[in-house]
Image: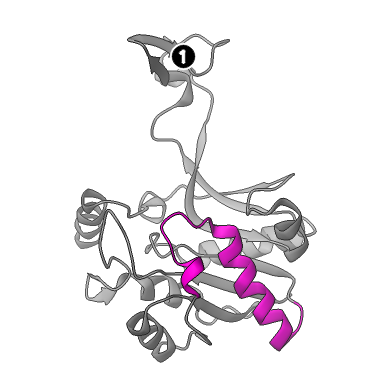
């Protein structure tokens, strides 16, 4: 099996400026993801899509493939992931031949383990190439969430009671952003990493589900790692 790992790491970030280059426990954030797939035989290359020369240089020095800087039109805050992924995938397959899957690793999930990546690849292979998405137990159960409009509260799930005890709630999972794996065919068909018949890669570990989006998230990651 031939899997291309993709790490999309822009220079810009509204909530955490320069976060992909910022040092987390002594290493730039983006390098945690580069290192998480090192030595995994199914991963043919780790391609980093970035518009930043410094990120490109540090990732190249860690063995990642950084063949170009991402075009300006694909580097804005409002650009969705699909065109970024398609740009990288099309270039790679034109130069290096077809791949069986494209695996997106968001740099904001630094504590993703190699074991979890391997499990994702095994699920992808054993299910015949079904899209795999990493999920973790939901921190806020959807049956306890409300839509608030015009000073009125409406349960998001209208046909279920909202006053169930915690032990009575059915299991609920949320996408943690650490891993997406999909065939090129499904990616192009759905124009998204979310597709039909998705298979869950359940990640129970709290640290692996940490997704750094704010300064508080960053401090939580540092505190958790040190303790």
In-front residue for pair 224/85: 85
Residue 216 in percent (x, y) is at: 21, 49
Residue 35 in percent (x, y) is at: 43, 77
Check the image and report above or below for 144 versus 26.
Answer: above
Q: Which residue occupies the extreme front position in the image?
A: 73
The residue under the point 47% across, 81% down is: 69
Q: Quadrant of the C terminus?
A: bottom left
Residue 133 in percent (x, y) is at: 59, 51
Magenta stretch? 71-98
Check the image and report above or below for 150 versus 208.
Answer: above
Residue 40 in percent (x, y) is at: 57, 78
In-front residue for pair 214/221: 214
Count of numbered circles in the view: 1
Check the image and report above or below for 208 versus 168.
Answer: below
Q: Main secondary structure of the magenta part?
A: helix
Q: Which residue occupies the extreme right position in the image?
A: 128
The residue under the point 37% across, 88% down is: 57
Q: Which residue occupies the extreme bottom position in the image?
A: 61
Considering the numbered disc 1 on the image, is that residue within a helix, a strand or a loop? strand
| Location of residue 3 (image quadrant) | bottom right
Question: Viewed as shown, does residue 21 lie left or right of 189?
Answer: left
Q: Is residue 110 magenta?
A: no
- In the rendered image, which residue does mark 1 sit on? 155
Colouring used for the render = one colour
The residue under the point 40% across, 84% down is: 56
| Location of residue 75 (image quadrant) | bottom left
Badge 1 density bin: few <14, some 14–19, many ≥20, Cα 10 Å: some
Q: Quadrant of the N terminus?
A: bottom right
């Amino acid at each position: 099996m031939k899997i291309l790992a993709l790490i999309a790491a822009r220079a810009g970030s509204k909530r955490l400026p320069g976060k992909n280059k910022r040092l987390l426990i002594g290493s730039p954030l983006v390098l945690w993801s580069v290192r998480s797939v090192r030595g995994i035989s199914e991963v043919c290359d780790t391609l980093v899509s970035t518009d930043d020369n410094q990120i490109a240089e540090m990732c190249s020095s860690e063995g990642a493939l950084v063949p170009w800087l991402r075009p300006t039109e694909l580097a804005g805050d409002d650009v969705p992931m699909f065109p970024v992924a398609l740009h990288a995938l099309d270039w790679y397959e034109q130069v290096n031949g077809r791949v069986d899957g494209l695996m997106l690793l968001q740099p904001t999930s630094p504590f993703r383990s190699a074991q979890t990546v391997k499990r994702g690849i095994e699920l992808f292979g054993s299910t015949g190439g079904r899209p795999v998405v990493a999920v973790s137990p939901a921190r806020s159960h959807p049956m306890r969430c409300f839509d608030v409009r015009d000073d009125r509260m409406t349960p998001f799930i209208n046909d279920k009671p909202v006053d169930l005890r915690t032990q009575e709630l059915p299991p609920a999972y949320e996408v943690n952003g650490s891993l997406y794996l999909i065939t090129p065919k499904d990616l192009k068909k759905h124009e998204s990493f979310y597709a039909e018949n998705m298979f869950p890669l359940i990640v129970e570990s709290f640290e692996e589900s940490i997704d750094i989006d704010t300064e508080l998230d960053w401090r939580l990651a540092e505190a958790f790692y040190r303790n």
